[in-house]
Amino acid sequence: MGESVNSRNIRIKESAVGSAIVSGDGNTIYVIQQTTEQKREKPVSKGTADIGPNPYKGLAAFKESDAVRYFGREVQIERLWQRFQALYEQSEVPRVLPILGPSGCGKSSLARAGFIPEMARKPLPGKEHMRVAVMVPGARPLESLAGVLAKAVTGDPFPAEKTEEFERVLKKPNDVGGSEGLRRIVNLIPDIRNTPLVILVDQFEEVYSLCENPEHRQAFINNLLHAASEPTGEVSIVVTLRSDFWNETQRYEQLNQAIGSDYSVNVPAMTGTELRCAIEEPAKQAGHPLDEATIDLLLKDTEGREGALPLLQFSLTRIWDGLSDGKTPITTYRAMNGVGGALAGKAQETYDRLSTSEKNIARRVFVGLVQLGEGTRDTRRRVRVESLIANNDTPEMIQQVIQQFSSSGSRLITLSSADKHEMTEVTHEALFEHWQLLHDWLDNSREDIRFHRRLENVAQYWDENGRAEGLLWRSPDLDLLYSYQSRAAQDMTGIETAFWQA
């Protein structure tokens, strides 16, 4: 379990377009990333001891660059690699490797910091060089897929025109109504026969929770399955999917069969031994091992609890920060009231430091980053920062509040860039359950939130189509809008207000 870093013999560097190049012994995996997480300057430590960078990830998922500090999942990494090898070598299609599990079980980290680097350490026979395109579907899965493919083809970090072109190709059906745009685009990638493509669709459940266009959802799924069914083996698909969304796949027979195949990997909860490895090895590797008493308390708080991994990593991050301030691990642990209290405590602590106007913005931002569940749990929602700017806000005001929650000391919100737009999302859905204030915001205004999302979509469509009069609401929708505006005008954006006024 606790293998040394030497046995993790890979090299990772960043490419010119912000993606990763993972090299093993004579083999290379080129990782094309859909979005690039924004880099921030490392804060000057105010602590009493310089103990080096924090080896824990907080709420953020592990990525390829974190492979050398990703511990505890060695058995599952090997299992994934074996399944992928068998899938690639068999004659059945489509080549789809599903990674299933509940929220917070570490699916994304296993895929990115475990499976992808393992392909560099142990290449498939005859496939010493491969490409991995990493994407999340979002509200516009075809656009997301087109964007990462455009990067793969052009090497341009912001290929806007090529993305638009590829999206049109992905949407266009063939003569019999099928979707083969992905296959056609992949054929354009240089040396694709010798360097095949693996498309990792992380958080696949977003095609159901965020995408509201059933035709686009169908085209996205069809494109993936068609390309993965080609006998040439140029495209393979890996998906991570929350297990509570498995029923949604029953609408698409071929996808449902792939999800339920023998190649699927259900990610189990980490055993006590694996958790101990994940807790102690990063600190040991960094030269500051944690004491056994603290490790035992963390294990007691975490073992057997669903979705506890991000909470554990967040607690470990705070314990490490405490070390740099001269505090013992056990002192920090007790001050944050254990694993469950660490996350909620940090969120509330950050919120309490804000001014009254900033608190109002924070409420709008966090509510705007939640996709309300319909018979399922609430999920996070990735949006453009500009879409969170209400009438009385300025971009600077929004940025200032988001920065409070996205700084290296908080990491409750993640910022990234995609197609020249600044994107933001809640780092992990564990925040929804453990921060009581956010829980109250959501429960007290669910109907208003649902109406606002509807207004947001309609107003955006109206604006994108020349603000045509025929797209304006009439009664009874207009009556509902008047009522909503009277109590929530401060939450409406400029476009939404223009729609109401028109």
Image (spheres, grey):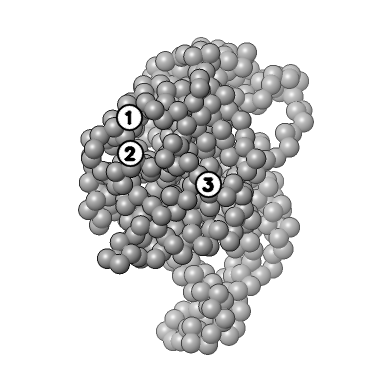
Kind of residue at disc 1: Gln
* Residue at the spot 35% in from the left edge and 65% down from the top edge: 173
In this figure, which residue is indicated by the disc labeled 2? 97
In this figure, which residue is indicated by the disc labeled 3? 152
Vertical relation: 303 (above or below) 147: above
On screen, residue 237 versus residue 25, left or right, reads left
Give the numbered dot on residue 447: none
Residue 87: x and y in percent read: 29, 34
Kind of residue at disc 2: Leu
- Which quadrant, please, contains the N terminus? top left
Q: Foreground residue, 476 or 224? A: 224
Q: Secondary structure at mark 1?
A: helix
How far apart marks 2 and 3 lie (CA) works out to 21 Å
Residue 438: x and y in percent read: 52, 51
On screen, residue 439 versus residue 87, left or right, reads right
Residue 476: x and y in percent read: 42, 84
Q: Foreground residue, 41 or 392? A: 41
* Residue at the spot 63% in from the left edge and 61% down from the top edge: 386
Q: Nearer the viewer, mark 2 or mark 3?
A: 3
Query: Can residue 222 be seen in the rendering of this structure?
Result: yes
Residue 259: x and y in percent read: 27, 43
* Residue at the spot 38% in from the left edge and 43% down from the top edge: 235
Q: Kindly indicate whether the residue at mark 1 contacts the one at mark 3 (C-beta within 8 angstroms).
A: no
Kind of residue at disc 3: Ala
Q: Earlier in the sequence, mark 1 or mark 2?
A: 1
* Residue at the spot 58% in from the left edge and 61% down from the top edge: 161
Q: Foreground residue, 468 or 472? A: 468
In this figure, which residue is indicated by the disc labeled 1? 85
How far apart marks 3 and 1 lie (CA) works out to 23 Å
Quarter holding residue 271 = top left
